[in-house]
Amino acid sequence: MRRDILVAGILFKNYVGSFREQRKLLAFQIFVVVSQIPVVLSVFLSGGHGGAGILDVLERFGVDKYLIAALLSFFLSLLFWIPIIRGQSRIRIMSAAEYSFLLSQPIEVDEYVVGRAIFGGVLAPLVGAVILFIYLPLPVALLNLPLWRIPLLYAAFILLLLYAMLLYYTGIVITHLAELVGRKRILRIVGALWLMLSVEVGVLTSSVPVFAQLLGAPVAYLIVGLMSRSFFPFFGLIALSSVFSVSLVLFILRRLSRGVSPEIVTLIGAGPHLRDKTGKVEEAGIVRFAEMVDMNRILTSKIFIDLKRYKIFAIYKYGVPLVATVSLLVRFLGDLVGLFGGSGDLYEFWEFMGPIFGIVIFITIAALMVGSVIDEMKCFWIYRSNGVNDNDIARIIFVKLLLVGMIAPLMTAAMMVLTLDPLVIAAAFVVVTFYVLLMIPVMGWTGVRWGTRVKVSPLSPVLYYTEEVQRDPALQFIMMLVMAVAGAFAGLQMLLFFLVISIPYLIFVVAGISVLLVVIGERILRALMRRVEMR
Amino acid sequence: MKLGRGMRLPVIEAYGLVKSYGSTVALRGLNLVINEGEIYGLLGPNGAGKTTTLKILVSLLKPDRGHVRIMGIDLHRYRVEALRNVGYVPEDPYIFPNLVVREFLEFIGRLRGIPRDILKERIERYLSIFDLQEKERDLIKTLSRGMLQKLAVISAFLPRPRVLIMDEPMSNMDPEAQHVFKEEVRKLVRNGSTALISSHMLDMVERFCTRVGIINKGVLIAEGEVDELKRRALGGEDATLEEVFLAVVRGG
Ligand SMILES: Nc1ncnc2c1ncn2[C@@H]1O[C@H](COP(=O)(O)OP(=O)(O)O)[C@@H](O)[C@H]1O
Ligand SMILES: [Mg+2]
């Protein structure tokens, strides 16, 4: 067992780097946590009534903590079955260093597999995804739970992450073993049967059947219990059996992987390009640059087709109207059935949840924003060696960032349609736009720093979530910084939202400052472009 | 020195280039002068500083010290004007992944102000000689490394620039494409262009470059025509370029 932990530790080192880098990282994580205080603060300032609102509304829909725990159990179990159903018999890693490290050291495969599960489940999130841990105390704040729940929640959460990874790896190892004895197909059929039965029985009985929850149950009930006001009955037993299940799966994984060949590990080449299957574009879809004269038009068209082929405009055309329509529908149907019993609860619920959704949407969009800049920066040599001046590059990058970023306010506003309150809808739009404009220089800077590093493979948006980040301390540094800034701004954004709702004429003030931000943002990008070096 | 060569105009001039990346010093006072009508081969082992030099010459990097003139124009002060004369091929070309091949070439052509009809004609011709006709409507992200290199080379040739600066342009090309590439460079040079090509592969350079410079650890340690360099090495006239190279690099 000690060697597994050693392996996990070495992997950790491999991805995180020297101790000095780790210290730097730690400092930044603390910074991130501190920067999140405004978010938590704004929850307390809003009186925590949002939490109660959420629960009431959910309960009216028949969602109680039992259902949530059952669903979580199902999803956890699903992690075990997914590799089986997909027939995934390989552990895929991205680091060549890790790959050669495995093959050249006197380490048994089982030690490696368990070590990697520990690394991936516990250590990697600790480094790469601090954000996961930051919001953990939120339910405590929302539901006025006793503070001693917080450390327990952290422990349970780590247990959950570890368990999830162990289940997933066990699924892979079992598939691998089945492949070795030529029984993979049968195994896949069993997996598919399990999934079908779970869903079908679930839909027929409107509950989650026991066999669908089996693997995940103890840990899921543990964490949901800790997050709710009253525990489940026999909570001590649940806690005990959680620890027992994790140990058991750990033991089983270790036993099973003794029979596995080292080929279970494959290196996925982070090659220079992601190959697409459909490469050809219809003649009609091709942009005729040769026919264009105006330099402005040429550069802007280039940005537009880029976004079009990234399907960004599809979100504008279909995504936003769809969300707005669904919001309206939910509202009218809900009113019809009397589901919301007056609009009080719902209004409060949504007023509270809106900005949170806004942030979630924004974080997703932010990855896209950075990715779109990275793509431009990797191609910076084309602009520069062909004599395009820096101001023009800055302008088109600004336009690109804006077009991607504006998805966030539009989506948020579309969801706010649910309230049927023009003020809330307008406030959401204006405030999130303000936030996007604030973030453009930050995202631009990140994209420039990131995109001009030759070592990084341009997997663009996905980058945020991959091991690529965990491997490169400089990228971590950048990401931490962005998260810190985004988090701090997000908190401010929520405060601003509540402020605007109570003092409506502030909308005009915020809109005015936004116009100013456009000018400032472009200036900052110009300064950035002048300094670009393609290292 | 042969008579007349010294009379030619310097096209690329770099004096006292120093560049470090953190604690790694990549260039330590490099001087390089390339004259009109030359096909200059910049040779050196991995990590010698070839790529760094070429990036500085197209202002993708700023030197810590030293300065550069292209066609007599100060690169630092008049970047856009100086680069108007340059076609550049990077070591590992990353090209707009969401454009198709023809869109990219037309885009470059328009940036360079090539008239529409001439542009179409040239694109057609280059696509055909580099065997990329089939790929005309393909998204660039689906191309292989060799194809990307060919595409970057075509984009550099397209405006018929006075100066070609190319970083290991043949490293991923098949022999057929290498042959076409050399022919085209010769043709451009006959019509008044000058080429600077870096390489770590010696045989590429032997019957192609008119002059060769050998760079090691960030300084130019030998320079001359291929025959001249051979004469200077111990092996005499029969020495292979490889022997010259090893002798010079090891001699320090
Ligand atoms: N982006 C970079 N960051 C740090 N060091 C670099 C970077 N690029 C090049 N170097 C270092 O600078 C030196 C010269 O590299 P380079 O110019 O790429 O050489 P060459 O092209 O001749 O192989 C090498 O020691 C290399 O490791
Ligand atoms: Mg190089």
Image (cartoon, rainbow, N blue to C red):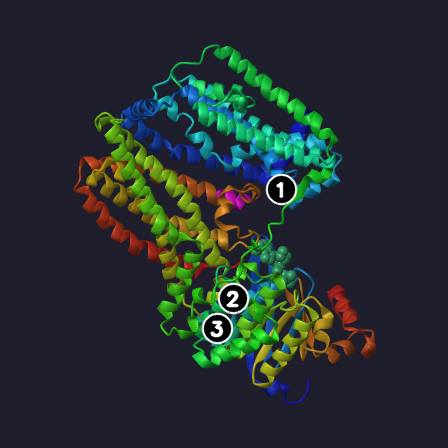
Q: Which quadrant is home to the N terminus of chain A?
A: top right
Q: Residues within 10 Å of mark 3 (few under 14, many from 20)?
A: many
**Residue B175 appears in view:** yes
The image shows residue B193, relative to residue B175, as above or below, that is below
Q: Amino acid at mark 2?
A: Arg
- Provide the residue designation for mark 3: B83
Q: Chain of mark 1?
A: A
Would residue A328 appear left or right of A280 to someone viewing this image? left
Q: Amino acid at mark 1?
A: Ile
Q: Residue at 49% across / 19% down in the picture?
A: A222
Nearest-to-viewer mark from 1 and 2: 2
Task: Name the chief secondary structure element in magenta.
Answer: helix
Looking at the rendered structure, whether the residues under marks 2 and 3 are on a common chain is answered as yes
In-front residue for pair A230/A136:
A230
Nearest-to-viewer mark from 2 and 3: 2
Looking at the rendered structure, whether the residues under marks 1 and 2 are on a common chain is answered as no
Give the mark nearest the N terminus, 2 or 3.
3
- Provide the residue designation for mark 1: A93
On the image, the x and y values in percent for residue B135 come to 56, 67
Mark 1 to mark 2 CA distance (whole Å): 34 Å
The image shows residue A329, relative to residue A157, as above or below, that is below
Q: Which residues are magenta?
A: A472-477
Asked whether mark 1 and ligand 1 are closer than 8 Å, the reply comes as no
- Provide the residue designation for mark 2: B137
Nearest-to-viewer mark from 3 and 1: 1
